[in-house]
Image (cartoon, grey):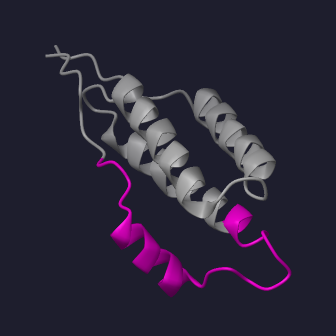
Amino acid sequence: MIPKLKTSGKRLRVKLNRVGDWAKRVCNRRPLKQIWAVFQAKLRGHIQYYGVSHNGKALNEFVYQATRIMFRHLNRRSQRKSFTWEQFNRFRAAYPLPPVKIHHALY
């Protein structure tokens, strides 16, 4: 029998709250590319730690929600919106996020 692990809902919420708190602190203090590089590193670390067999759905959800949080905070950098979704997706294509993959096979 294969153990099927998935990220606890409470841990997922806590990690997303931490992403939001971090984004709130740095979005007006650092250049965009520097913020994005640190955000990519944070996602990479989360994916590597929680990337176990059968946890891909929770990883995809975390990356999706964290990206939405970053979009929201990046748009608060000035009174005028910094990005539309189309512009944000072009930026993400130029500076892609780390791919979601399973790093630890448990079977």
Query: Per the image, is 93 magenta?
Result: yes
Residue 8 lies, in percent from the top left, at: 54, 27
Q: Residue at x 65, y 29 (%)?
A: 10
Q: Is residue 30 left or right of residue 57?
A: right
Query: Per the image, is 8 magenta?
Result: no
Can you name the residue that lies furthest to the right here? Answer: 79
Residue 4 lies, in percent from the top left, at: 30, 23
Up the image or down, 65 lies above or below 12; here it is below
Quadrant location, the N terminus:
top left
Q: Nearer the viewer, residue 27 or 53?
A: 27
Up the image or down, 17 lies above or below 4; here it is below
Q: Residue at x 79, y 86 (%)?
A: 80
For residue 91, which quarter of the picture?
bottom left
Q: Is residue 99 left or right of residue 45?
A: left
The residue stretch that appears in magenta: 72-99
Q: Is residue 49 visible?
A: yes
Q: Residue at x 25, y 40 (%)?
A: 101
Q: Is residue 66 visible?
A: no
Q: Nearer the viewer, residue 2 or 81?
A: 81
Q: Nearer the viewer, residue 15 or 36?
A: 36
For residue 14, which quarter of the picture?
top right
Q: Is residue 100 left or right of residue 89?
A: left
